[in-house]
Image (cartoon, rainbow, N blue to C red):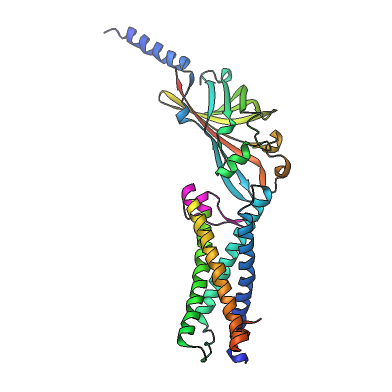
Amino acid sequence: MNLKPLILAAASLLAAQAHATEYNQVQADKSAIQFSYQQMGVKMDGKFKKFTSQLAFDPAKPTAARAQFDVELASVDAGSSDANQEVAGKAWFNSKAFPTARFVSSEVKPLGGNHYEVTGELSIKGQARKMVIPATFTAQGATGVFDGAFTLRRGDFNIGEGSWAKFDIVANDVHVRFRITAAGK
Amino acid sequence: MNAVRYTAPARLLHWLMAALLIGLLALGFYMSDLPLSPEKLQLYAWHKWAGVTAFILLAIRLLWRATHRPPALPASMSAAAQRMAHLGHLALYGLMIAIPLSGWLMSSAKGFQTVYFGVLPIPDLLAKNPELGELLATLHGGLNLLLVVTVLGHAAAALKHHFVDKDDVLRRMLP
């Protein structure tokens, strides 16, 4: 029995799998951007209901990965209807004049295992800041899940001006968590 | 006359709570109509901390009340008047328990955990549920209107005892 063709076929299949799985079909319903912040020592949770993502990640070539997120700021849920109304206003997001927040990656560095460091520019309300964001990637069958968290300082982006500019009531640090699920092709 | 007065701890707790409850009531009615601002959030936090404090004082007071008999009402009071007085006090205690509880539940339902003095988190009794939060806010407000009426009745009765009946009912609670 000649096994050679079978082995060759198996090997080429493995090779194809190792190379070609680029995760780039983001599944919005399985993706989320959430955040939390402290308000007089009380932890408040929020999220963005609408955002679009463009993603291309091949675990075999992580440094070539690209990511861009556009977050619809008006879709914020900051914890209560009062707060939602307030954060849409000029002092906070001013989402009429600045409807989206955008993150564009510039570099992806593998840190070993399934850990990566994504460097990119985050722009909110006309302010751009370089961010370094740790993230993990987990393949789950045909889809891949990207999890990450980082802290941004709302003061860097003029989020909360005027009477809100001090951080004694609403803290400066905002902890952002994201989970992006993407199918491979 | 000293023999029939309330004990010093009972008098202290009564007047401490009187001052605290009047402050809480005034602050509560004032702050709830304010537009959202850092001041409003600050006042809400203070109101909650003071409310928790009142609840703790109440627990101490109930413990004291359970272990120390208050002086008897004057024999000159009719049985009906004595029953009214007991009912009134029962209503005050009931409201002093129900009001902080409704505030605590409301905070949980609205998704704002209470953190005592910004340090000690008080566990949430309910999951976040904005509709239930609105309902509990209405209940909290309604119970407080009832408290205002009951406290006014309480004060009016004490003054009537002092100035009309000329008995020692008010004097035995004076500081």
Residue B134, horizontal then vertical, whole percent: 50, 51
The quadrant holding residue B79 is bottom left
Residue A98, horizontal then vertical, whole percent: 65, 28
Asked whether residue B119 is drawn in magenta, I would say yes
- Residue at the front extreme, as displayed: B164
B58 displayed left or right of A29: right
Q: Residue at x 57, y 29 (%)?
A: A71
B54 displayed left or right of B109: right
Residue B104, horizontal then vertical, whole percent: 52, 58
Q: Is residue B117 visible?
A: no
B104 over B86 or under it: above or below: above
Q: Nearer the viewer, residue A68 or B106?
A: B106
Q: How many marks?
A: 0
A105 over A34 or under it: above or below: above
- Residue at the left extreme, as displayed: A1
Q: Please state, as top left, top right, bottom left or bottom right, where the N terminus of chain A lies in the image.
A: top left
What is the span of residues highlighted in magenta in the rendered image? Answer: B107-132
Q: Please state, as top left, top right, bottom left or bottom right, where the C terminus of chain A lies in the image.
A: top left
Asked whether residue A21 is drawn in magenta, I would say no
B136 displayed left or right of B36: left
Q: Is residue A41 visible?
A: yes
Residue B4, horizontal then vertical, whole percent: 58, 89
A140 over A77 or under it: above or below: above
